[in-house]
Structures are given as C-alpha cells and as structure tokens.
Amino acid sequence: MAKKLRKRESLWQQYRESDVFVKLSAGIMGLSHIKNGQILKGIGYFLLELAFVVYMIEKGASSLAGLLTLGTQQQGMVFDKAQGIYVRVDGDNSMMMLLSGVVALAVVICFWVVWRAQLASAADTAKRKREGRHVNTVVEDLKSLLDENIHKLLLFIPMVGLIGFTVLPLCYMILMAFTNYDVNHQPPGNLFTWIGLDNFRVLLASSSTLSHTFWPVLGWTLIWAFFATFTNYFLGMFLAMLINMKTIRWKKVWRTIFVLTIAVPSFVSLMVIRTMLNKFGVINVELQNLGFIAEAIPFLTTPLGARISVIVANMWIGIPFTMLITTGILTNIPGDLYESARIDGAGPIKMFQNITLPYILQITTPYLISNFIANFNNFNPIYFMTEGGPETLEYFKGAGKTDLLVTWLYKLTTDSMDYCYAAAIGILIFLISAGLSLLVYRRTKAYNSEEEWQT
C-alpha cells in the first residue's frame, strides 16, 4: 500500500513540476508528445481520446444512464387515435441495457488507465527533453516491444481476451444478482430493475421456499465434496502404495490398466454406470439371477441410495488421478528414511504415519484443497448419474435430493429462468469456495513451513 502511495505521489509530483504542455495533456492527450517530437505517438493518443469522446456522446453516456435505470419504457399495446387501432410500442431491453452499461463502464476504466499512462509518459518525455537526454522515436518504441518490453506485447492479447471473455461476463453475472431478473421479469415485455441485496436475503435469511431449499442443498454439497475428495485421495494413495510395493510384479501393467479409466470421457463412464445401476440394469439382474436379492436394489430411486451411488461412482473417475500423483511422490521419498525406521523397530503402520503420510500431505495439500473445491462444483457426476433426483415435492422448482448448488443453479437458469437467484447462488458458491480454501490453506503445514520445506 505504501509503495502504491509513493508511486502516486511520484506521478503527481512529476505532473506538478512539468511544463504547461504536460499539464494541458491532461485535457488534450498527446499534446506534450507532439511538442517534444513524438508526433505519431501524440497523434495516436489524441485520436484515442477523440474516439472515446465520440463513443461517450453517441453511446457511452446513454449506456451508463441506462445502467442506473435498466429501462423505463415497457413494451405494450397503445391505442393510436389517428388509426383507431391498438399498436405495439417497443420497450426498453433491461438485459441489453445492463450489458451495454457494463461495457461502457469497462471502456471508461480502460480509458482512465490509458490516460494515466499517457500523462506519465508525457511527464517523463518532457523531463528527458529538459535534461538533454535521448527521447525515443516511434520506431524505437516499436523495436523495444521486441526487446526489453516484449512482456507488454506478449501480455496484451491475453489481457484483452481475459477482460472480454472472463472479466466482463463475470461482472455482468455479479450485477445480475442485484436485480429481479426472473421468470416474471423477462425483457422487453417485462423490465427488471435493481433490488439491492433482496435476493441474498431471500436465499439466506427468509422463510421462503428458496431459503428452505438453499440450506439443505448446501449441506449435501459440503457432504458430497468431503466424501468425493477424501475417498478418492486416500484410496488413490492406498492403490499407489500397493502397486509400489516391492513384492508386486508388473507394476507398469497395473498402472496402465487404471490409467485407462482416465482416457474414457467421464460423462461416458457415468452414463454407463447409471445404466448398470438401473432397476433392470446388469447389477440388479445378475444379483437376482444368482439369488442374492429378491427385489431390485434402489440404487438411484431413493435419496440415500442415490447419494451413496454417486459417491461410489465418482471413485471410478477420481482414484486414478490421485494414484498417478501419489506414485510420483512415493518414488521420490528417500529410501534411507524407511531403512532407519526399520532399524529402530518401526512397522509398516508406524512408517506410514510418520514418513509416508506427512511427506505426501506436505506436497499434495494444495492439490487436496483444489480438488475439494472442484468437487464442490462438480457438475458431471450428479447431472449424468441422477440429474439431481430423486426429486421431492418439498423442494423448490426441481431441486432434488442429490442436487448440488451448481446443478441447482443450472436448473434455475434453464428450467425456471430465475437468473437473479442463479447469479446470487453463483456469488455465494465463490465466497464459500474462496473462504474455505484460504482458511484451510493458511492453517496447513504446506503454507506455514514453506521456507523450511524449500531449504
């Protein structure tokens, strides 16, 4: 913070100590550059400012104003006295006004960044000219983009893509959470407007059906994320240790067999498992034919059975990943540690507790946390196995007993078009995921002993 403050003070100090042309550049971009011989650069800045002014006059100002109101004219039928008939009057589109407002706001922010960079460049160029030092030409500036400033050239296109395809859609989604954009407010027929934090209040602290749905779904999401993460983690670790044992032959063959499950797309595996677990699937049919059961086991038709089934099915997909990661770690554990432990009389369990597990946890803690967050938002196992079901009447708009927050969010957008609630749930998912990640990671040994580990 202090460093940023000093940088701002330095820019302000340069501006105050510069000549009148630098000061005028705050209003007419590129003026100081033109005066100091950087004509093309100055013209470029001026044309950029001119384009910004034209945009704000033609579109930007109205877009920012529309961002505040989200529309006032509603589409409808109005009686035309001259024609003696009702005619349709086109209304505002709140959705497009919100999008245009976000884009206009982004343009203003980007222009402010360029304006500030132009002012700093103008002050630096004037100072160089005053002190008799060399001032780069346009050709020299372009050449520098292939030399000492190549990082700016390489980062420019990814940054534009990041802003255009990630930042702006995220801002649009976040702002949508503070509106009443739902099935009853579909523009242009029905406008939506700003409602502040009402969506979050409805989801978290009200007596509505939405609130009574959110908390059970959140509870199951946390349970699912815990079991889906740690079953894969510890069973994958056990499988890697088992294959890594000296008495096991054909280690590469066994690893290849398990890695083959990764080669098959996860949704294909999940659809096959879903078919196998049906009432007339191969598992129920064979168990009945062998006389082990009289009726089909309700793998996917009862809440408890469906929840256990998706957790078990997820093991088929997740265990091989953990096995591969753990295998690489096991091969790097110094063998001297195990030899010393054997001399001291330690058995396999003691060596696992004091050598293997701490070593693996030290390295894989970030992976474990990221895997937990990935499972928290794991759409595929739930959707392709149960589609969130089995559904019950006590749940709101299709949310079932195996729905996670992310699958419920999907249903709110595709089935009931309650975009505002879906956006609010998306923000809550981010806050929960980020909060849990930071809280857990800062308490782990991988974070607190990072320097000690590196040495």
Image (cartoon, grey):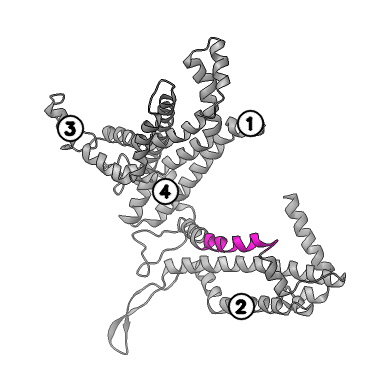
Name the amino acid, label 3. Answer: Asn
N-terminal-most mark, 3 or 2 = 2
* First in sequence: mark 3 vs mark 1: 3
Q: Residue type at mark 4?
A: Val
Q: Residues in magenta?
A: 147-164
Q: Which mark is residue 284?
A: 3
Element type at mark 4: helix
Write down the residue under mark 1: 453
- Hey, which residue is sitting farthest bottom in the picture? 82
Examine the structure image and report whether residue 156 is included in the region drawn in magenta: yes
Q: Tell me if mark 3 has few (under 14), some (14-19) or many (20+) residues whose alpha carbon lies within 10 angstroms of its own.
A: many
Q: Which mark is residue 377?
A: none
Q: Picture quarter containing residue 27?
A: bottom right
Which residue is under mark 2? 53
Q: Nearer the viewer, mark 3 or mark 2?
A: 3
Q: CA distance from mark 3 to mark 1?
A: 51 Å
Judged left or right of residue 330, residue 235 is left
The CA distance from mark 4 to mark 1 is 47 Å
Left or right: residue 203 compared with residue 344: left
Residue at position x 83%, y 69% from top?
Answer: 128
x and y, in percent, of residue 255 in the image: 39, 33
